[in-house]
Structure formats: structure tokens, C-alpha cells
Image: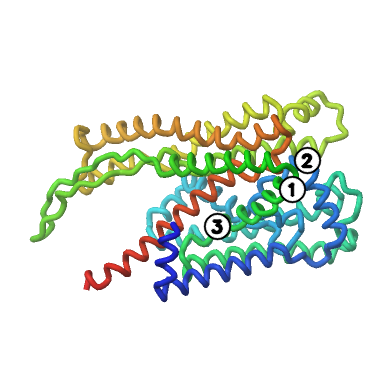
């Protein structure tokens, strides 16, 4: 990795792309600490410190992660990248359900551009809803339940509330624009790099807090973190390669085919999406208990005791099983063995020992189903690390190497290095190709 970045900085055009990307990241972090007009900065800082020292199990935990700590500061970029992630996931699911979107996906680049435009519109809508919800929580004091100070300068000023909603929504639009700038003029993977930036942003402060509290705990956390990173890198790189042979065929006067390739099926074919799905679904019980906290209903009481916090066996088992379910569900809608088999048959490809068509689809489904099992278990075990840390040591909020964080850091880091290395290879082979 270090070698790739060193060689990239020695190449003038790649150096410009890297410096441009670093500049966008700096601007992005500036917006994450810039407070929204109407926020009482001193009271907010006091409530924020109190929330960090207390229990952080709340209904906005995932948004707080993807905002790099900006949510509880009510900054201009408080929503972070979460509205865009949610909109992208929704559009991916709708492509399977709505024939019009499925047709757009098959149109190639033009159809994908249209789906991207729909994703932007949906992102703005979700940003309006989320910013309104979080400002309402701040206005009523539920954003920091244990803090009695007003975090807004004038909670009853409707014009100020609307202004804050507009600014936070505009902040989300700017984040989308910055991500597209990195994709077009930087090293690529703009949105992923911004997600990576937000997740990594909280690491220095968390590690410093652990070091100041207990040096032995800091050493244990570092050892566990290095082990987890190595394990995630190993699994994320693991794949099953299905060999594919293309028969020779005549097109006009030219002969095509006769080559061998493979279909790479990753062990973690679903990525981090199942974890986000499961976490979002388990925030609903926390939301219900917060809305009906004064209710004596038996069901509400059971939910608050078993599903509202992450240190109960029922919560852990439910979270783990949801990840397993969503892993199989997401893989089934993103990889269609029948479509892959039909495309292979159309272009004269076949798997050695397997007949083209339906037998190929059944074979791919057989391999994918059994390959998804270890991938689902891996996602479930990695995601359980912070919850187990909370149950054993009560230190989930101080454990920076959470499953979601590690998956994002390793995945984006590997993809970025691969992109830089591919651009270096293009420049090294330029003279040969000419």
C-alpha cells in the first residue's frame, strides 16, 4: 500500500488527483465541525461531553457513525453520508421490484445515470426528513436525554428551525457533490472515501480516551484491533473462482473466443449492507420505547427490557439472525444465477463439466448458497464484537474497532489502493501500447 502511494506521488497527474482528494477531505471535515446557525455552542458542547461519558445506545447510533461524530454536534454536515447510503440501498431494492427501474439498469450507462439521478432526489427527501427529526429531538431535549440544557438558541422560533433544516439538507447536497468531484477528478470511489473519512475521524479521540483511562486496556484494544483487521482483510480478499471456457466462433471473417476466464464469487458477496439493514431494523424498538417511555403496556415493557439495549441475550441473538437473513436476501437480489448463465450461453461460454443453460444456473446457485454461509457467519461475528464488549466490559462506546467500522475501513482502503495501482499500470504500459 505504501509503495503504491509513493509511486503515485511521483507521477505528476496522479499526484494532482491525490492532492485534490485530500483537499476535498479537508473541506469535508471542516463542514463536519462547523455548527449550524441557531445552535447554542456552549450548551451543546457540555451535553456532547456528557453523552460521550454515558450510554450511547440510542436510535441514531448508525447515523452518528456515518457522520463521524458530527450528528451530536449539529454541524452543517451533521447527517453525513447516511441519507445517500439509505437512498442507494432503497433504489437497489426497487430495481428488483419495479420493472421500469430494471429496464433502466439493463440500458447501460444512460440507464444507470437515470437511476443515479433518482438516488439524488431520494437523498434530498430523506435528508429533509432526518434533519427535521433530529432538530425536533434537539428542540424537545430528547437528543441528549440526560442533559437539561437547551442546545438551541431559540427553540420556539419556527423560522430558525426551518433555516436549520434547509442548511442541513443543503449540507447533504454538498456532500454528494464533493463525492462526485472525487470520483471525476480525484482517485475515484468518491462516496466510499467520504464514508471512510467519517468513520476514521473518530479513531484518534477514542484511542486517546482509552489510553488515558487505562494503558493495559489500550494495549488489549490495539492487539484485538490488529487481529480483526487482518481477519477482515483475509476474508474480504477470499473468493471462489468458477472457471469459464469460451468456445471459438466466427463473426464475419474474424475468429472470436477460445479463451479461459473465471467468475469471482466473493465469500462476503453482500458487503456491509446486511449489517446496515439489521442495525436499522433494530433501531425501531428503541424508537418505540422512546416514544412510549411513560406507557405501562406489557409489550412496551418487554421491548424496553430485551430489545432496546444491546447487552441482552435476546437482542444479540436477534441481531445475529437478522444479519444472516439479510446476507442471503441481499445476495439473492444482487446476483442472479439464471441471468449469468443466459449471458454465458449467449456468448458461447460454459463451465467445464456443466451443461450451458439451466444446469449452469443451478450449479452457480448451489455454489453461491454454500459460499454465502461462511460470509454470513463472518459478518455476524464481526458485528457482534462491540455488542459483546458492551456486555462484558460496558465499553462499547469506547471500542473504536467495531465491526461496521472495520468493514468500511478495510473495504474502502483495499478498493482505493487497487484503483491507484490500476492507474499506475496504465501509465507504465502506455509506451508499450503505443
Residue 81 can be seen in this image: yes
Residue 326 pos. (x, y %): 53, 36
Residue at the location (28% across, 39% down)? Answer: 242
Residue 388 pos. (x, y %): 65, 32
Which residue position is annotated with label 3? 119
Which residue position is annotated with label 1? 212
Task: State how far apart marks 2 and 3 are (Cα).
Answer: 34 Å
Query: What is the quadrant of the C terminus in the image?
Result: bottom left
The mark found on residue 396 in the picture is none
Of the residues tagged 3 and 1, which is closer to the observer? 1
Q: Earlier in the sequence, mark 2 or mark 3?
A: 2
Q: Earlier in the sequence, mark 3 or mark 1?
A: 3
Using the rendered view, name the quadrant where residue 135 is placed. bottom right
Task: State how far apart marks 3 and 1 are (Cα).
Answer: 43 Å
Which residue position is annotated with label 2? 55
Residue 64 can be seen in this image: no
Amino acid at each position: 500500500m505504501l509503495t503504491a502511494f509513493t509511486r503515485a506521488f511521483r507521477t505528476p497527474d496522479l499526484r494532482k488527483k491525490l492532492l485534490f482528494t485530500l483537499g476535498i477531505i479537508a473541506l469535508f471535515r471542516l463542514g463536519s465541525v462547523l455548527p449550524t446557525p441557531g445552535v447554542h455552542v456552549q450548551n451543546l458542547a457540555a451535553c456532547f461531553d456528557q453523552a460521550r461519558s454515558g450510554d450511547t445506545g440510542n436510535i441514531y447510533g448508525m447515523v452518528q457513525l456515518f457522520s463521524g461524530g458530527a450528528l451530536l454536534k449539529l454541524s452543517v454536515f451533521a447527517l453525513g453520508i447516511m441519507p445517500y447510503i439509505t437512498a442507494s440501498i432503497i433504489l437497489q431494492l426497487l430495481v428488483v421490484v419495479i420493472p421500469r427501474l430494471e429496464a433502466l439498469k439493463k440500458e447501460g450507462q444512460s440507464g444507470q445515470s437515470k437511476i443515479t439521478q433518482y438516488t439524488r432526489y431520494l437523498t434530498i427527501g430523506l435528508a429533509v426528513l432526518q434533519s427535521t427529526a433530529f432538530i425536533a429531538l434537539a428542540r424537545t431535549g430528547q437528543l441528549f436525554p440526560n442533559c437539561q440544557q437547551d442546545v438551541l438558541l431559540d427553540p420556539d422560533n419556527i423560522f430558525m428551525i426551518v433555516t436549520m433544516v434547509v442548511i442541513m439538507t443543503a449540507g447533504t447536497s454538498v456532500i454528494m457533490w464533493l463525492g462526485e468531484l472525487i470520483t471525476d477528478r480525484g482517485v475515484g470511489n468518491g462516496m466510499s472515501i467520504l464514508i471512510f473519512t467519517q468513520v476514521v475521524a473518530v479513531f484518534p479521540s477514542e484511542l486517546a480516551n482509552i489510553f488515558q483511562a487505562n494503558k493495559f486496556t489500550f494495549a488489549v484494544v490495539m492487539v484485538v484491533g490488529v487481529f480483526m483487521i487482518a481477519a477482515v482483510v483475509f476474508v474480504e480478499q477470499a473468493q471462489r473462482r468458477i472457471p469459464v471456457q469460451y468456445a471459438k466462433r466466427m463473426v464475419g471473417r474474424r475468429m472470436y473466443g477460445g479463451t479461459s476466464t473465471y467468475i469471482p464469487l466473493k465469500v462476503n458477496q453482500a458487503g456491509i449492507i446486511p449489517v446496515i439493514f439489521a442495525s436499522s431494523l433494530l433501531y425501531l424498538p428503541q424508537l418505540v420505547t422512546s416514544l412510549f417511555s411513560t406507557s405501562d403496556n406489557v409489550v412496551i415493557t418487554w421491548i424496553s427490557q430485551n430489545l432496546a439495549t444491546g447487552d441482552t441475550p435476546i437482542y444479540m441473538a436477534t441481531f445475529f439472525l437478522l444479519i444472516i437473513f439479510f446476507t442471503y436476501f441481499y445476495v439473492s437480489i444482487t446476483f442472479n444465477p439464471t441471468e449469468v448463465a443466459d449471458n454465458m450461453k449467449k456468448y458461447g461460454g460454459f463451465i467445464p463439466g456443466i451443461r450451458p443453460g439451466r444446469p449452469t444456473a443451478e450449479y452457480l446457485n448451489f455454489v453461491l448458497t454454500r459460499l454465502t454461509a461462511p460470509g454470513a457467519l463472518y459478518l455476524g461475528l464481526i458485528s457482534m464484537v462491540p455488542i459483546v464488549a458492551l456486555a462484558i466490559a460496558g465499553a462499547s462506546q469506547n471500542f473504536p474497532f467495531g465491526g461496521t467500522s472495520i468493514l468500511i475501513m478495510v473495504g474502502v482502503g483495499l478498493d482505493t489502493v487497487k484503483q491507484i495501482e490500476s492507474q499506475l499500470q496504465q501509465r507504465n504500459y502506455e509506451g508499450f501500447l503505443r
